[in-house]
Amino acid sequence: MLITPAFAQSGGFAEGGLGLMPIILVMVIFYFLLIRPQQKRAKQHKEMLAALKRGDKIVTNGGLTGTIIKAVDDSETIEVEIAKDIKVNVVRTMIADVRGKTEAKK
């Protein structure tokens, strides 16, 4: 036998601790590249939905564009005019983007 039993045994923590480093590194990379930006986008979307008001031009997730006619802060839905005299109720969370904001009246 060329290797004595003392050299053949594992080092314990030295190898085990270094074995976890790639896993920890991947978790850190996932956090900064995937999780953190997604949380930031969700926060911006929530703030956008809270700031909706009458007269804003919006785009829904389905691709419909329209103007907000009625937006109640506590309500889950808002009323949107998609064409002249055609009004639909849209669930607030299904709004993808605000295209035009109305100016605040003085």
Image (tube, rainbow, N blue to C red):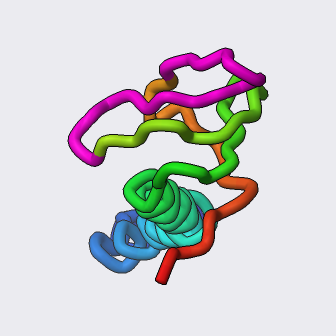
Quadrant of the frame with the N terminus: bottom right
In the picture, residue 34 is in which quadrant? bottom right
Magenta highlight on residue 74: yes
- Front residue of 30 and 66: 66
For this view, does 72 lie left or right of residue 19?
left
Give the residues drawn in magenta, as a range.
73-89
- Front residue of 24 and 69: 69
Q: Residue furthest bottom?
A: 106
Residue 30 in the image: above or below residue 17: above
Count numbered badges in the picture.
0
Residue 58 place in picture, x, y as percent: 67, 44
Residue 6 in the image: above or below residue 53: below
Q: Main secondary structure of the magenta part?
A: strand
Residue 26 place in picture, x, y as percent: 56, 63
The answer, for residue 101, to whether it is visible in the render is yes
Residue 43 in the image: above or below residue 64: below
Magenta highlight on residue 61: no
Residue 19 place in picture, x, y as percent: 46, 66
- Front residue of 88 and 93: 88
Residue located at (64% from left, 63% from top) = 101
